[in-house]
Image: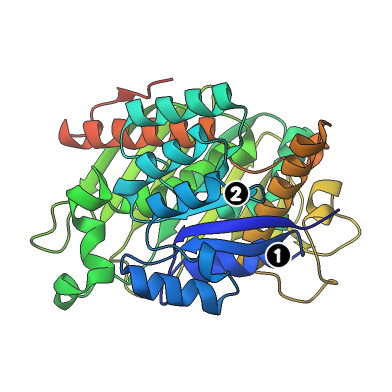
Amino acid sequence: MSKLSWGMIGGGEGSQIGGAHRVAATLDGAFTFAAGALDIDPEKGRDFAVRLGAGQDRAYGDWREMLDGESSRPDRVDLVTVATPNNTHFEITKAFLQAGFNVLCEKPMTTTIAEAEEIVAIARESGRLCAVNYGYSGYPLVRQMQAMVAGGELGRVRLVVAEFAHGFHADAADADNPRVRWRYDPAQAGISSVVADCGSHALHMACFVIGQEVTTLSADFASCIEGRKLEDDALIAFRMNGGTVGRLWTSAVAVGRMHGLTLQVFGEKGGLRWAQEQPNQLIWTPLNEASRILERGSSELLPAAQRASRLAIGHTEGMFGAFGNLYANLAEAIHAQKEGGRPDKQNLSFPTAEEGLHSIAAIHAAVASAKAGGTWVAVER
């Protein structure tokens, strides 16, 4: 297949997430970086885009300039990644979808349910792809878990327990650190901080793996550092439409926890346990049997996990590879779109705008529940 061209908005030099996207998009040779509006400072953004390989005429000062410039080109970019602060996701994603571009948006896709519903509708009407970067669903052994659940190896799933807890916002002295401050500012982050930032990843992974959606939930939020307007710790109990019971803990003040993304799935016939910091191993415990370790890269894994692996067994594949799997899936879908064909369904595992909408609805329900003292709240569908 020929290489596709790719553009990025946000994720400039020094960005926490921009570098990961740039490695992931080009990991399998599917995309070439062609255009960007990378920084809130127009000149810094232009300079960095040129250093990354964009032509002078495709190094843009802001996203509106990029939209105008790319829309008029016969060789416009095939995919645009939006990696800007939360409060800008809706406007940028909407504009590019309406102009006929495929979009990969950082999570959360929007800050309101109405905006998320509008993005879903525009994507459907335009026929463009709109994906959301719940990138951890790209890990090979997460896809192994999903395939095992779908194949009935666990039987009916009774319970799912998800965590995403770290301690990197635990220092009260960081109140004026711009990388931390915006996450607790409702004007930039929206109605939620750690649940939207980290908890949404864990919740999406739970939904992705067991193939169910959240219907009701009860939440307890805490702002452990004085002065924060949004939560830095949360505990959520939830119920799913397939009858599964769920538990989620997410925190930004858990000193000693590094990345802290884990998922445990407990079914009638056995249980699974995976941790993102040890991504090469999945613990599988069949009912009444000893636990065993499933290794990434093993020939015994199911096809979904084997397709998502690049290295031989024993070598570490991490976040770049997981994000790269989303870009690889998107590339196949875009090639099919351009050629009028149908992509292999087994390779279309990227999170969609519909999944982004479900996450936003769950976040809003959690905020409402927490404000009401933990009352059970229905998640809008």
Residue occupying image coordinates x 43% and y 38%: 95
The image position of residue 40, as x and y in percent, is: 31, 65
Q: Quadrant of residue 332?
A: top right
Task: Describe the element under mark 2 as helix, strand or loop.
Answer: loop
Residue 227 in the figure: left or right of residue 334: left
Task: Name the residue nearer the viewer: 342 or 255.
Answer: 342
Q: Is residue 106 visible?
A: no
Residue occupying image coordinates x 16% and y 30%: 372
How many residues crowd around disc 2 within 10 Å: few (fewer than 14), some, or many (20 or more)? few
Task: Name the residue nearer the viewer: 328 or 208.
Answer: 328
- Give the residue at the far right of this rendering: 299
Q: Which of marks 1 and 2 is nearer the N terminus?
A: 2
The residue to which callout 1 is attached is 281
The image position of residue 156, as x and y in percent, is: 67, 29
Q: In this view, does 309 lie above or below 343?
A: below
How many residues crowd around disc 1 within 10 Å: few (fewer than 14), some, or many (20 or more)? many
Residue occupying image coordinates x 62% and y 65%: 33
Residue 20 in the figure: left or right of residue 345: left
The disc placed on residue 73 is 2
Amino acid type assigned to the residue bearing label 1 in the image: Gln
Q: Can residue 373 be seen in this view?
A: yes
Residue occupying image coordinates x 86% and y 63%: 298
Task: Describe the element under mark 1 as helix, strand or loop.
Answer: strand
- Separation of residues labelled 1 and 2 (CA atoms): 46 Å
Task: Name the residue nearer the viewer: 33 or 257.
Answer: 33
The image position of residue 315, as x and y in percent, is: 77, 76
Q: In this view, does 265 lie above or below 185?
A: above
Q: Quadrant of residue 44?
A: bottom left
Judged by depth in the image, the label closer to the viewer, 1 or 2, is 2
The image position of residue 158, as x and y in percent, is: 58, 32
